[in-house]
Image (cartoon, rainbow, N blue to C red):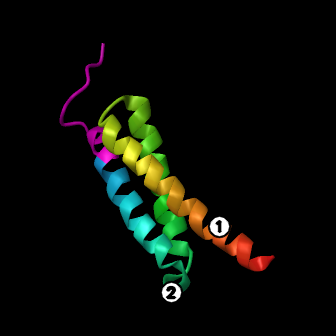
Amino acid sequence: MATRSADSPATLYGPVSAVLGALALVAAVFAGFLGIAIPLLSGSLAVTFALLGLARGLNRGRCTVGLTTGSLSVLHPVLLAAALSV
């Protein structure tokens, strides 16, 4: 039977998703200057790591922050591009 280790690489899913989500959210605010590739890539990675961390049950608070900021940073440029194309 496998036990959860505190030194497992899976414990980094929460902090990594929170940092990537915050980076993506800042890049999404400046999407007009930076483009939409950085927020989309960083946001999708933040969402992926957050979902993996939530599935493991480790660092749930940081995973929730990463999931929220990552999804907002993915939606902001997409909705901005859709609004400007109409």
For disc 2, the marked residue is 33
Magenta stretch: give its range: 1-14
Pinpoint residue 14: horizontal percent, then vertical percent.
32, 44
Residue type highlighted by circle 2: Phe
The percent coordinates of residue 36 (x first, y second) are 56, 75
Q: Secondary structure at mark 1?
A: helix
Instruction: Give left or right: position of 28 versus 10.
Output: right
Outermost residue to the top: 1
Inter-mark Cα distance, 1 to 2: 15 Å
Give above or below for 63 relative to 56: below
Figure check: 17 above or below 35:
above
Q: Which residue is mark 1?
A: 78
Q: Nearer the viewer, residue 35 or 81?
A: 81
Q: Is residue 44 visible?
A: no
Q: Is residue 74 left or right of residue 26?
A: right
| Three-letter residue code for mark 1 | Val
Magenta-drawn stretch contains 13: yes
Who's the residue at 48% across and 73% down the image?
29
Quadrant housing the N terminus: top left
State whether residue 41 is above or below residue 53.
Answer: below
Is 38 positioned to the left or the right of 6 in the image?
right
Task: Sort mark 1 into few (<14), some (14-19) or many (20+) by Cα contacts within 10 Å.
Answer: some
Compare residues 85 and 9 and report the one nearer the observer.
85
**Dot 2: what SS?**
helix
The single residue placed furthest to the right in the displayed view is 86
